[in-house]
Image (cartoon, rainbow, N blue to C red):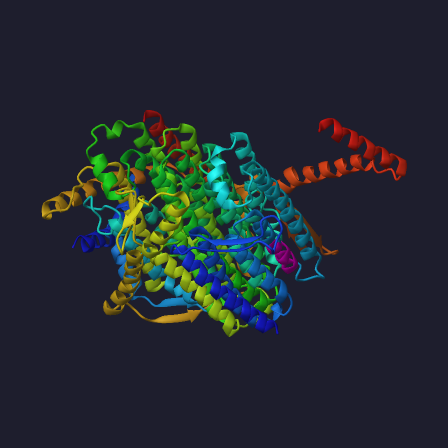
Amino acid sequence: MLAVLQIVIVGAGAPLLVGALRTFKARLVGRRGPSPWQPYSDLRKLLAKEVVVSTTTSWVFRATPYALVATLLTAALIVPVVTARPPLAFAGNIILLVYLFMLGTFFLALAGLDAGSAFGGMGSSREVAVAALAEPTVVIAVFALALRADTIDLGRIVERFGGEPWLAANPAHLLAFAAMFIVMLAETGRLPVDNPATHLELTMIHEAMVLEYSGRYLALVEWASAMKLFVFMTLLANLFVPWGLTEPGGPMPVFIGILALAVKLAVLTTAVALLETAVAKLRLFRVPELLAGSFALAFLSLMAVFVVR
Amino acid sequence: MTRLVYGLVALLAVAAVGLGGYGMTGGAGALRLPWVLPLGGLELTLDPLGGLFLALIGFAAIPASIYAIGEADARRGHFAYAVFVTSMCMVPLAANMMTFLIAWELMSLASYFLVLHDRRSKESIEAAWIYAVMTHAGLACLLGGMLLIGADVGSSRFADWRTATQALAPATRGAAFVLLALGFAGKAGVVPLHVWLPLAHPAAPSHVSALMSGVMIKLGIYGLLRVSLDWLGIGPPWWGATLLIAGAVSSLIGVLYALVEHDLKRLLAFHSIENIGIILLGIGSAVLYRAAGLEALAVLGLIAALYHTINHAMFKALLFLGAGAVVHATGTRNMEAMGGLIKRMPWTAACFLVGSAAIAALPPLNGFVSEWLTFLALFQNMRLEAIGQNLVFTLGIASLALTGGLAMACFVKAFGITFLALPRSDAAAHAHEASRPIRVAMVTLATACVALGVGPTLVVPAFGSIASAVLGTAPEAIGGDWLTVRVSGQFASLSTAAIAVVLGAMFVAPLAALRLGGASRRTRAYERWGCGRIVQTSRLEYTATAFSNPFKRVFDFFYRPTKRLDIEFHPESRFFVERIEYENPTRSIFDDWLYRPLLRLLHSGARAAGALQSGSANQYLAYILVALLLMLVLA
């Protein structure tokens, strides 16, 4: 039951999250912008369209959209979404999550190379560079959390921190949150690392890689990108602000969990929209500096844990 | 005749797997023939750790020998190959110094001749020469370390060392550790003793490269395990810290070099350095935990190291055989001249993809499981109350994470540039699929990678019993049931089998949903989008050089790339370019800052010593007299 619910929340909620983010950004710069429900219409339209597949491509190109969706739907079962006991908690933890994202990136980057155009290759090369440089931050930040919770099981970390009243004032916690927030921006292709709104700019990363996709394949890739944002934001929200998540038991905790998630995601979306309106995209070769900065934050968080121990 | 030899080696390998498996499950055996060798005689014993490595050698040698039967390139060198495999099988069984060193040296010599396979190529002569020098420097260290212990303990049998070394003076023990660790680390290819590895492995024929990279360097790991956990007893923390730091540095530097390498086989050789580093992270943590008395965590670290050792042997052998098939089909090792091979060589491509995903530690394959265990072993340093050691562990965690990401990037490049898009040369356009024995060998190894990935619940307890036999404790760090591996109680759990099933279901579900939901199924094959350009050739493709350029720029303090741009204009007008040459090589900091100064020092030392050799007989007689007097005075 919970498994189906989590998949439905992530799968169905992801386009709304992206739509809301776009609408809010448009309002911030004084445009009316599209309705938050626009991504659903986009997906439906794409699903009805014909697919154009390059003659140079192989089965890797055609399998990738499905593989990508599979990694994210699996990830949706590992993250605590509405309760502190995700259905696949026994099968893995945060390290598995990180490597599942890598699996998706791996296939997507291969698909980018498969068409044999310079654009796709460029996007792939940049995407894997960003993904590789972001990884140490995630792992060190998680280590800082695990150190205090004495487990790397996501559900147990949530439970452990749910009972800690002074969580928001803990320097280790705040530093780890900041580090993970930067990684989220990088991993999901948001400003200032990548610009999700452009299609024809040489500075782009993710959009260049998926340039050859069309029709239902593009729909799947876009849906997967939206889910990645959703899963990452949920992870950030529930791991660092674990309020409202309890053990499953009856419909009430689930209801509260959904409500809490909605509130937390709304706050995070606002933060991302404000940030994206305020900052410009970084030059590609400045991105490693940003990621190094996030690593430094994660490392400081870890040191804070060691010192106050 | 050659086929017969390879067939016999394959049989020997099967026997090695059987014997090794017997040893792993607790079977013991001993063979002693004092008259064969001086100083203790030939002595072989079978124990769990030796059994594991013996089985590993056998398991990798079976597909390699099958491959050699199908490979025209393997006509020569069958005798050296047979000696190579046999001596490798002897190393984990050797029970005294003499047996060990003779097996070790035979293995080195046989592999030297195999590296020198192509006797006309200057490159392979140089590779073989550097390999010979490095491996013998290592042998000298081993000999020194072993004689040091042997003299103090008064026995050359390893069984006696185990009981006696704990009582040795710390300085002697430390010196022996350093010497032995240096010797074994050189064979394992630990940075900065790795220089021979990226030269020697690609020079050998592919089935030998697979064995050298998959198994021979693992015997260096075997030696390091024996030294740090077995022969010398429980060591002080600096042993473990040294191994951990060496592992962190090796893993990172190996993958960084691999990223900018476009020779397919050399890229794989650099990844061997990386994976040796990952194994060392596990060993280092085991030694440190053991020194602190945390036996359960030491078992965990050792399990992670052993698991990764086996995994690396499987996927690296697979990748080397795949690379061999590609090199055979295209006649080049340069990735920039490949491309589009997935259409001409579907079997090789599929197997290489499995190997790539496994080495990049992607779930649910085997590389992921062992890296996960290594992470878990490193994470639990919180149970140590020493901030310095905690920092060393943190270094290991960060480098392992970065290594994982960079390895993924590197294998996107290796697979994508080699197998995808359009062929970049005529040879690649007319490549042919590998022959049947080669395909069988690759599919076997790919299956092993998948099985070791989804079946950790069966494999981990086996490694657990080996680890506890080495450390002399019961494995309490790892539990679980048929589906789940559980580490340290509530700390973490993993079930790659469940992940594999869920991933498969989630792969099929959208496929079925789109079919049933009435999504459009119209598909049109058309040219890729080329910015309006009409003629599209493979020259417009992204190259391996371009792919790795972001990394070259990010890590330029390490690569120190030099750029050379040579443009020749048309004599009539500068707007027409006749020829462009672009070179962007990296410089090795180890060559520049370690080996060259060392060689210079050696040369000047030799020149200075050359003054002694005047050619005058009287002077030589005087030397003898002085030496004699000195000895009398000292004695």
Indicate whether B302 appears above or below B435.
above
Q: Is residue B444 left or right of residue B424?
A: left
Q: Residue, x 47% and y 53% (percent of image)?
A: B50
Residue A162 in the image, given as x and y percentages of width and height: 20, 35
Classified by dominant secondary structure, the portion drawn in magenta counts as helix
Is B43 left or right of B571, judged from the image as shown?
left
- Residue B424's spot in the image, x, y percent? 57, 64
Q: Does residue B319 show up?
A: yes
Which residue is the extreme one toward the top? A308
Tell me residue B587's x, y (percent): 63, 44
Question: How many discs mark residues in the rendered view?
Answer: 0
Closest to the observer, B93 or A185: B93
- Name the image quarter holding residue B517: bottom left
Q: Quadrant of the C terminus of chain B?
A: top right
Q: Residue at coordinates 23% horizontally, 43% vertically from top-left?
A: A155
Q: In the image, is A276 to the left or to the right of B169?
A: left
The reply to whether the magenta stretch includes residue B113 is yes
Between A71 and B459, the residue placed more toward the observer is B459
In the picture, the quarter occupied by the N terminus of chain B is bottom right
Q: Quadrant of residue B182?
A: top right
Residue B528 visible (yes or no): no
Q: B580 or A103, which is in the foreground? A: A103
The percent coordinates of residue B247 (x first, y second) are 49, 42
The magenta stretch spans which residues? B106-115
Rendered residue at 36%/67% (across/down): A51
Furthest-front residue in view?
B35
Residue drawn at (49%, 57%) of the image: B316
Quadrant of the rendered structure where residue B181 is? top right
Magenta segment includes B218: no
